[in-house]
Image (spheres, rainbow, N blue to C red):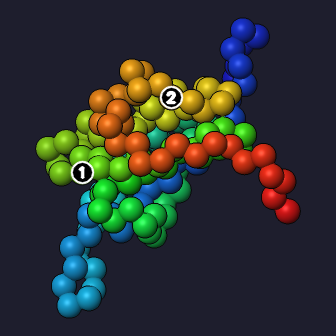
Amino acid sequence: MTQSADQPATVPMALLVCTTCASTWQNGKRVGISGGEQLLDRLQSRLADGANGAIALTPIQCMSACSHACVVAFAAPGKHSYLFGDLPHDLAHLDQTVEAIAACADLYVNRPDGLLAWGERPEPLKNGVLARIPPTTVPIA
């Protein structure tokens, strides 16, 4: 991704997607394709179309927000991290959710601090913030 002189450089981000969200269980075993896997699949297609190399789509087996399926997170070095939940994952709303996540990720990747004001986030991401975590200031060895 190239930047003009008047644009800040982007910091690559991780877009984490919980792949066990909205799973169906039978006899203690997961069956079928989860809502999280469907979301991940659509996001892979959507982000490939945009060819934005600054967004690293990362599947996560469980993000421990099971009562708020579907869940995604935005994280990047030196930025606030976000955990979004209660994202619509039914087939009627899945494309809208994917577009909202992609648009919000584009905002996030271009923010030096990662802060996303409520009013600028796409609708599905306005009320689903489960956590906003400040950047760590502790050196990690």
Residue for point 22% across, 79% down: 25
Q: Earlier in the sequence, mark 2 or mark 1?
A: 1
Which of the two marks, 2 or 1, is nearer to us in this view? Answer: 2
**Which mark, residue 49?**
none
Amino acid type at mark 1: His
Which residue is the extreme one toward the top?
6
Badge 2 local density, few (<14 within 10 Å), some, or many (20+)?
some
Q: Residue 133 at x, y = what percent?
A: 58, 46
Q: Residue 70 at x, y = what percent?
A: 32, 55
Residue for point 26% across, 40% down: 95
Q: Quadrant of the N terminus?
A: top right
- Answer above or below: position of 116 versus 20: above
Q: In this orientation, does residue 37 appear?
A: no
**Which residue position holds label 2?**
116
- Answer above or below: position of 118 versus 63: above
Which residue is the extreme one toward the left?
92
Badge 1 local density, few (<14 within 10 Å), some, or many (20+)?
many
Q: Would you say 1 lies left or right of 119 here? A: right
Residue nearest the observer in this picture, 14 or 45: 14
**Which mark, residue 89?**
1
C-alpha gap between disc 2 and disc 1 = 22 Å
Q: Residue 9 at x, y = what percent?
A: 72, 25
Q: Residue 67 at x, y = what percent?
A: 29, 62
Residue for point 43% across, 67% down: 64
Q: Secondary structure at mark 2?
A: loop
Locate residue 78: give its quadrant. top right
Q: Would you say 33 lies left or right of 1 here? A: left
